[in-house]
Image (cartoon, helix red, strand yellow):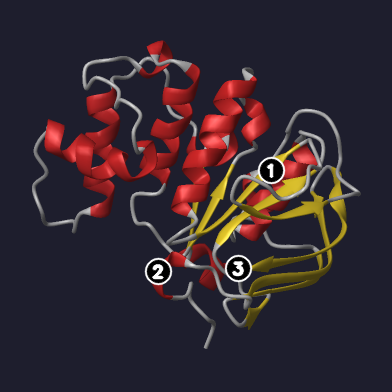
Amino acid sequence: MRDAPEPGGTPSDATLIEGHGLSVDASWGHIYGPVDLRVRTGGVTVLAGPEGRGRTALLLTLAGRMKPTKGELVAFDRSNDAHHLFENAAVAWIDEVDGIEQTIRVSDVITEQIRWSAPWYKWVTPAREEDLERICRPVFGPYPLPAMESFVEELPELTAALFRIAVGNLRRPPLLVVGGVDNLTRRENQVHLMERLVDLGRTQTVITADINAVSPAGGVRDVIPVDNLTDGQFIGLEHEDRT
């Protein structure tokens, strides 16, 4: 059995994910690898590497959304079991997986997420303020929630990022994989976002990415430099390349 975070939210030293020689080749060419890494249970782990399709694909692999073409990925005590990893992981703020239509209201997004998570036979009414609070407050913490009638495209940068993470993390599984904090353009927003991820890391294992290979600080548990990533924007991710 894998070890959960210790009582009081303190991460254990157990290994949640371990990759050996991970590599992914899509239908149109090489994406990343080989990569070796170890993610400990609990807290925030940052993958340090350039933004691009390789880093995105690695994040998706660690969330069970892509299968490695080569190598071994041991997660939740199972080897190369992408389906089991998928069931235990949430993905947020990665356009290739959880992109939100910009011309849609916050209330509509919340309602749709509640419908997806509800049993098929249950009638779901339009979301209310208490639904917004329940879904978003654990991620937003002290920051103000978006207005229900706001359009997603009108949300400030940090608010939009936190909202997507909150929606993607609705089930709150043991593992949360979040797109790179360096996707935010303002440094102060990157700092605030990382603070919120650190808070989530008290009860989940959080994996994100940043181009800066800084030393662990401010609550970040591990920073793992990752080489052999394909640079450039993520293009051509065909359906058969994903789980």
* N-term-proximal mark, 3 vs 1: 3
Q: Which residue is mark 1?
A: 209
Res. 137 in view: yes
Image coords of residue 14 (percent x, y): 62, 78
Q: Measured along the vertical axis of the image, is residue 138 above or below residue 119? A: above
Res 145 quadrant in image: top left
57 left or right, relative to 226? left
Q: Residue at point 48% right, 72% down?
A: 5
Image coords of residue 78 (percent x, y): 62, 81
Q: Measured along the vertical axis of the image, is residue 239 above or below residue 69? A: above
Q: Which residue is mark 3?
A: 82
Q: Label 3 sits on what residue type?
A: Ala
Q: Are marks 1 and 2 in contact (CB under 8 Å)?
A: no
Q: Nearer the viewer, residue 30 or 142?
A: 142
Image coords of residue 30 (percent x, y): 88, 47
Q: Residue at point 64% right, 27% down?
A: 183
Q: Label 2 sits on what residue type?
A: Gly
Image quarter in which the C terminus is found = bottom right
Q: Are marks 3 and 1 in contact (CB under 8 Å)?
A: no
182 left or right, relative to 53? left
110 left or right, relative to 232? left
Q: Nearer the viewer, mark 3 or mark 1?
A: 1
The secondary element bearing badge 3 is classed as helix
Q: Nearer the viewer, mark 1 or mark 2?
A: 2
Q: Nearer the viewer, residue 49 or 68?
A: 49
Mark identifier at residue 8: 2
Q: Residue at point 61% right, 45% down?
A: 218
Image coords of residue 119 (percent x, y): 18, 59
Res 120 quadrant in image: bottom left
Q: Are marks 3 and 2 in contact (CB under 8 Å)?
A: no
